[in-house]
Every structure is written in C-alpha cells, then in structure tokens.
Amino acid sequence: MKLVEIKNSLAKLYYEPLDFPLVISDFLTIDDGNQKILSQVVSIESTTKEDTNCAILKFTLDLDD
C-alpha cells in the first residue's frame, strides 16, 4: 500500500487487491508515527497499472486523544 495524496479530509491510497482486498465502507487506521487517524473507504477506482487499485479514504476520527 502507498498513500499518494492527502487533500482536505480525503486521501488516495494505492493498493494491490489480491494482497489487501478492500471494499467500500471498510475502515482503516492510518499511522504515520506521530498521529493515528481512523479513515473509511468511500470510493475505489482502477488505475492504469493492472494489479493496482486506488481507494479514496475519508478521515473520520483522530485516535490520538
């Protein structure tokens, strides 16, 4: 998985669906070492690369509290 873009409260995550199957409404925890945020998959798109999809995540809750 690779987080490629963060804009406002949305993020783009590239992933391989055979290794990490995601569906719309799945929840993921994003942890960069400084902050832990709960996010939800709101959209899944195909990419030009055959074995990679793009999930659009919406940040929902800051877990640092």
Image (spheres, helix red, strand yellow):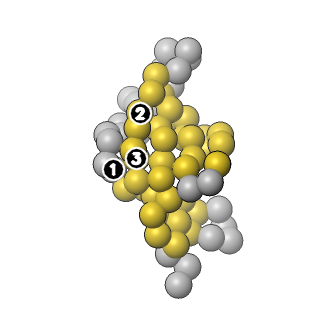
Residue type of the residue flagged with mark 3: Val
Secondary structure of the residue carrying numbered label 1: loop
State the mark number for residue 41: 3
Q: Quadrant of residue 19?
A: top left
For disc 1, the neighbor class at 10 Å (few under 14, some 14 to 19, many from 20) is: few
Q: Can residue 1 be seen in this view?
A: no
State the mark number for residue 44: 2
Residues under numbered marks 2 and 1 in contact, where contact means CB atoms less than 8 Å apart: no
Left or right: 27 as drawn, with respect to 33 = left
Residues under numbered marks 2 and 3 in contact, where contact means CB atoms less than 8 Å apart: yes
Residue occupying the far front of the picture: 8
Q: Give coordinates of residue 61: x percent, y percent.
A: 46, 69
Residue occupying the far bottom of the picture: 65
**Quadrant for the N terminus in the image:** top right
Tag 1 or tag 2, which sits nearer the N-term? 1
Q: Residue at left 40%, top 38%?
A: 43
Q: Can residue 39 be seen in this view?
A: yes
Q: Give coordinates of residue 54: x percent, y percent.
A: 50, 32
Of residues 36 and 57, which is closer to you in this image?
Answer: 57
State the mark number for residue 51: none
Quote the CA–CA distance across marks 2 and 3: 8 Å
Is 20 rendered above or below residue 28? above
Quote the CA–CA distance across marks 3 and 1: 5 Å
Q: Quadrant of residue 42?
A: top left
Secondary structure of the residue carrying numbered label 2: strand
Secondary structure of the residue carrying numbered label 3: strand
Q: Residue at left 49%, top 15%?
A: 50
Residue type of the residue flagged with mark 2: Ile
Quote the CA–CA distance across marks 2 and 1: 11 Å
Q: Give coordinates of residue 55: x percent, y percent.
A: 47, 38
State the mark number for residue 26: 1
Tag 1 or tag 3, which sits nearer the N-term? 1
